[in-house]
């Protein structure tokens, strides 16, 4: 099979490798595609702890496709079923997953792309956020995750203030239900504007969805007394500093919302499948850029550079 191999920082090649065989309790998925995640960018850029070359198909973990083989003991997944897969080598034509880590996609989704892992991540973050009707929720950073969370929070009856650098992203937030949008350009001006919008109360919930130091600093400032700061951004490029005095004085709860429990990850994907199938969420406008496997490097560059109109890249197979 064809598989992408990260050979050095900024260098990707396509190799022909052995097609994997499912072991006991596993299934093999013939992949239709995979989303590109911001977490891919650090290996792509090169970090001191990285080693090269990477594993074939590595970095890809947002795949979907059709089950084409099952291992010994697998009885609840059948060959030919279309699934979202929680697997880890999906920048390739085939990947292996535990039978419990593939989730059936209903026929009504047809041949729509379905990167289940990031959609499930959004639903799990939303659940951890404990958003309620009547609350004001600030979402700092409107990309794929921020847009989905804007829709979920709005549907829950919250008033969403979307804060984002790009005008395109702020427009996107409005289409997904944001009541207010603010350019993310001036720290103190943003704080003053949120004060005005909330009558000095600030926000009962603030979701930071960027993964950088300044947005995290800003998010902490926007939380109301006794509110919750939900860290949804991917903070893996180095240590962070936080204003513990402010957090402590406000008495806020800080929630790191990236789930690592496989059962909870699956729950989020199930909720996402149900929502898309029922028409409560349409993620199609968020799949802004598509690339074949041999252009994965371009997909990674676009994910890093965010050209105009970019939300999420999909690699199709």
Image (cartoon, grey):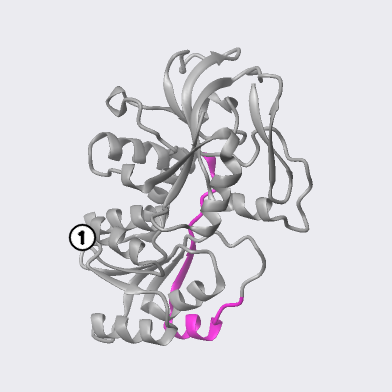
Mark 1 element type: loop
The residue carrying pointer 1 sits among few (fewer than 14), some (14 to 19) or many (20 or more) residues within 10 Å by Cα, namely some
Is residue 11 shown above or below 90? below
Q: Nearer the viewer, residue 170 or 190?
A: 170
For the point 57% across and 34% down, the residue is 293
Region in magenta: 241-262
| Residue 87 shows up from this direction | no
- Give the mark count: 1
Where's residue 238, x and y in %? 67, 66
Q: Mark 1 points at which residue?
A: 157
Where's residue 153, x and y in %? 28, 58
Would residue 8 appear left or right of 33 to someone viewing this image? Answer: right
- Quick check: is 6 in the magenta stretch? no
Would residue 178 appear left or right of 254 to someone viewing this image? Answer: left
For the point 30% across and 22% down, the residue is 107
| Residue 57 shows up from this direction | yes
Is residue 260 shown above or below 235? above
Where's residue 140, x and y in %? 40, 68
For the point 46% across and 14% down, the residue is 78
Look at the image and tell me in which quarter the N terminus lies. Answer: top right
Q: Nearer the viewer, residue 107 or 228?
A: 107
- Quick check: is 244 in the magenta stretch? yes
Where's residue 177, x and y in %? 23, 59
Is residue 211 shown above or below 109? below
> Quarter-wise, where is residue 261 in the image?
top right
Is residue 110 shown above or below 258? above
Q: Which of 97 and 64 is in front in this view?
A: 64
């Amino acid at each position: 099979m064809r598989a992408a191999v990260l050979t050095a920082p900024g260098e990707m090649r396509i190799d022909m490798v052995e097609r994997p065989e499912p072991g006991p309790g596993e299934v093999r998925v013939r992949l239709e595609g995979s989303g590109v995640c911001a977490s891919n960018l650090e290996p792509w850029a090169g970090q001191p702890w990285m080693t090269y070359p990477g594993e074939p198909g590595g970095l890809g973990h947002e795949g979907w496709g059709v089950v084409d083989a099952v291992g010994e003991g697998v009885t609840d997944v059948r060959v030919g079923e279309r699934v979202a897969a929680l697997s880890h080598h999906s920048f390739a034509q085939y990947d292996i997953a535990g039978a419990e880590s593939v989730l059936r996609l209903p026929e009504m989704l047809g041949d729509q792309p379905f990167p289940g892992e990031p959609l499930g991540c959004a639903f799990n973050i939303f659940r951890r956020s404990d958003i309620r009707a009547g609350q004001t929720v600030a979402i700092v950073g409107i990309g794929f995750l921020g847009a989905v969370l804007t829709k979920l929070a709005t549907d829950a009856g919250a008033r969403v203030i979307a804060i984002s650098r790009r005008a395109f992203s702020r427009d996107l937030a409005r289409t997904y239900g944001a009541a207010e949008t603010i350019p993310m350009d001036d720290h103190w001006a943003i704080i003053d504007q949120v004060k005005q919008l909330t009558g000095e109360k600030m926000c009962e919930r603030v979701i930071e969805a960027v993964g950088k130091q300044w947005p995290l600093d800003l998010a902490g400032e926007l939380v109301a007394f006794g509110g919750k700061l939900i860290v949804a951004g991917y903070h893996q490029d180095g240590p962070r500093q936080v204003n513990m005095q402010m957090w402590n004085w406000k008495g806020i709860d800080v929630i790191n919302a990236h789930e690592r429990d496989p059962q909870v990850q699956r729950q989020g994907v199930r909720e996402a499948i149900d929502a898309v199938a029922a028409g409560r969420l349409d993620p199609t406008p968020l799949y802004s850029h598509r690339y074949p496997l041999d252009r994965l490097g371009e997909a990674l560059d676009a994910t890093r550079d965010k050209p105009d109109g970019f939300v999420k890249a999909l690699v199709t197979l």
